[in-house]
Amino acid sequence: MAFLFNFNTTKPKRFNYRPLYYDERKERLEKMKARAEADLAAEKDKVSQSGLERGFLSERRANSKYRSSSLEKQSTLRFFIILAALLGLLYWIMPELFLEFWRSK
């Protein structure tokens, strides 16, 4: 009757995996890269908060105002030329649409 109630009290075997090849140099390099990236990020934060970058950007913005005004003029002119070309193409395809529009006024 003892074979019906078999209580096994032994613990299961633990999984113990040891890699066959361990590259210590690769692991050191990865740690060094992570440290260097953290240092670089910290340095970048310091530079972005400094007045040097703000001065550079304000100087750059001042110089770009002249460019942006001429670019805006070119952009507006380009828009009206494209609009006129599209309206001309639409009139060439469907002239009766434009005639009805002008008669309704």
Image (spheres, rainbow, N blue to C red):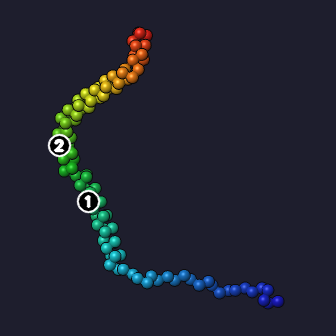
- Quarter of the image for the C terminus: give it: top left
Do the CB atoms of the residues marked 2 and 1 lie less than 8 Å apart?
no
Q: Is residue 56 left or right of residue 93?
A: left
The answer to which image quadrant residue 15 occupies is: bottom right
Residue drawn at x 75%, y 86% as measured from the top left = 6
Report whether residue 76 is seen. Answer: no
On screen, 7 above or below 91? below
Q: Position of residue 100 (x, y in %)?
A: 43, 13
Q: Is residue 84 visible?
A: yes
**Which residue is drawn at the image coordinates 23% and 31% (left, top)?**
74
Mark nearer the viewer, 2 or 1: 2
User: Residue placed farthest to the right in the image?
Assistant: 1
Number of other residues with Cα within 10 Å of mark 1, as a class: few under 14, some 14 to 19, many 20 or more: few
**Residue at mark 2:** 59
* Position above or below: 71 against 11: above
Residue at mark 1: 43
Q: Quadrant of the N terminus?
A: bottom right
Total labels: the figure holds 2
Rounded to the nearest whole Å, what is the CA distance between mark 2 and mark 1?
Answer: 23 Å
In the depicted view, which residue is nearer to us: 61 or 45? 61
Identify which amino acid the numbered label 1 is placed on.
Answer: Glu
| 78 on left or right of 24 | left
Amino acid identity at mark 2: Glu
Query: Residue at the bottom extreme?
Result: 2
Q: Between residues 83 and 29, which one lies in front from this camera angle?
A: 83
> Relative to the observer, which residue lies in front, 79 or 86?
86
* 22 or 42, nearer to the observer: 22
Give x and y (percent) for residue 79: 29, 29
Furthest residue in direction front, as rendered: 93
The residue sitting at 29% across, 26% down in the picture is: 80
Sequence-wise, which precedes: disc 2 or disc 1? 1
